[in-house]
Image: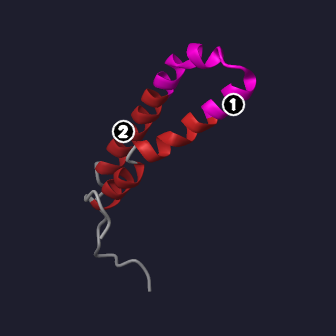
Amino acid sequence: MGIDPRHHYQPSWRKPAGMFLILAMILGWAILIGSLSSWIGRLPMWGQVPAYVFLGLIWIWLLPLRRLLAWMETGRWRRG
């Protein structure tokens, strides 16, 4: 039950490309939220905290990270 020595692992270009894409999406989201900081900064503290928490969590649902990770692993946009 070991690794078959005849099997040669061929690294995929999708993993490094996907990592750079994830970093680019995080950077883009940070720039977008940073551009809203002057507007959010005018809110009282009790309004700023939920705004930043909401914006910090919503990108998880907006950005297709699950599909991107599946593509990095399998080459398809959906597991299956």
Amino acid type, label 2: Leu
Vertical placement of 25 versus 72: above or below?
above
Tell me how far mark 2 sits from mark 1, CA to CA.
28 Å
Q: Residues within 10 Å of mark 1 (few under 14, many from 20)?
A: few
Q: Which is more toward the observer, 80 or 56?
A: 56
The label nearer to you, 2 versus 1, is 1
Where in the figure is residue 29, as x and y percent of width and height?
A: 46, 30
The residue at 40%/32% (across/down) is 24
Kind of element beneath mark 2: helix
Q: Residues within 10 Å of mark 2 (few under 14, many from 20)?
A: some
Where in the figure is residue 65, as x and y percent of width and height?
A: 41, 49
Kind of element beneath mark 1: helix
Answer left or right for 78 relative to 30: left
State the residue lying farthest toward the left.
76
Q: Which is more toward the observer, 36 or 31?
A: 36
Which quadrant is home to the N terminus? bottom left
The residue at 35%/45% (across/down) is 18
Label drawn at residue 49: 1
Question: Would you name the residue on which mark 2 appears?
Answer: 21
Which quadrant is home to the C terminus? bottom left
The residue at 45%/47% (across/down) is 61
Q: Which residues are magenta?
A: 30-52
State the residue lying farthest toward the right.
45
